[in-house]
Image (tube, helix red, strand yellow):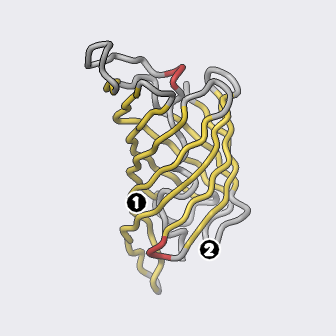
Amino acid sequence: MRHLWGMGVVAALAASPARAAEQEASSSGDAVAVQSVSRGLTFGLNLAPLTAGGPLLTVSADLPVLRLKTAWPVAFAARVGISEQVPVSMPPVGSALAVVRLESPWIQPYLGTGVGLAWAKLDTLLKPFPTWGVLAGLRIPVTAHWGARVELTGSPNFQSYAGAVGLEFTP
């Protein structure tokens, strides 16, 4: 069966604050500001040696759709993503995710939850499976366009989990 949790190693990819075009929708005295994100499409290559039943190597793309910045060094974000295992043997997995992340130029821990659509092969038929999951990770910005991360993910409804390391690139 295919890695059932669509967010798995994809979920951690996000545009870094240095790469986001911030347009505050509220006055400077507010505690939360809505920001639009440009140049946010992020590509990833993920190695998951601690995966229960999932793919060892995946490629992914994620697009932030909303970002809320607070008066503290914490940001809330929503994004959609797609991932594919290597070698390709199933359709891509899609996901929608909400994440809270500590904003820092050196290290960015994060927590998230979301939903995904994954695939399983039953006999000769492919069947989509909606799922939900949780994640925790640590992102390290390396340059303005490159980042590295370590992430743990889990899907309680399918009792699956993954531990992954990855590289990400945002043009």
Would you place residue 120 above or below residue 149 in this image? below
Q: Position of residue 76 (x, y in %)?
A: 41, 37
Give the side of residue 82 with respect to residue 53, left or right: left
Q: Residues within 10 Å of mark 1 (few under 14, many from 20)?
A: many
Give the side of residue 78 with respect to residue 11, left or right: left
- Label annotation for residue 77: none
> In terms of sequence position, does the residue under pointer 1 or pointer 2 come before the other?
2
Can you tell which quarter of the image residue 115 is in?
A: bottom left
Would you place residue 133 above or below residue 120 in this image? above
Helix, strand or loop at label 2? It is loop
The residue located at (44%, 75%) in the rendering is 157
Q: Which residue is mark 2?
A: 53
Depth order, front residue of 40/108 = 108
Q: Position of residue 51 (x, y in %)?
A: 66, 67
Farthest residue to the left: give it: 26
The residue located at (62%, 74%) in the rendering is 53
Helix, strand or loop at label 1? It is strand
Q: Quadrant of the N terminus?
A: bottom right
Q: Position of residue 84 (x, y in %)?
A: 54, 55
Q: Which residue is mark 1?
A: 116
Give the side of residue 26 with respect to residue 73, left or right: left
The residue located at (49%, 68%) in the rendering is 155
Amino acid on which disc 2 is placed: Gly
Q: Quadrant of the C terminus?
A: top right
Amino acid on which disc 1 is placed: Gly
Q: Position of residue 109 (x, y in %)?
A: 60, 41
Find out whether the residues at labels 1 and 2 contact each other: C-beta distance under 8 Å: no
Give the side of residue 3 with respect to residue 49, left or right: left
Farthest residue to the top: give it: 28
The residue located at (26%, 18%) in the rendering is 26
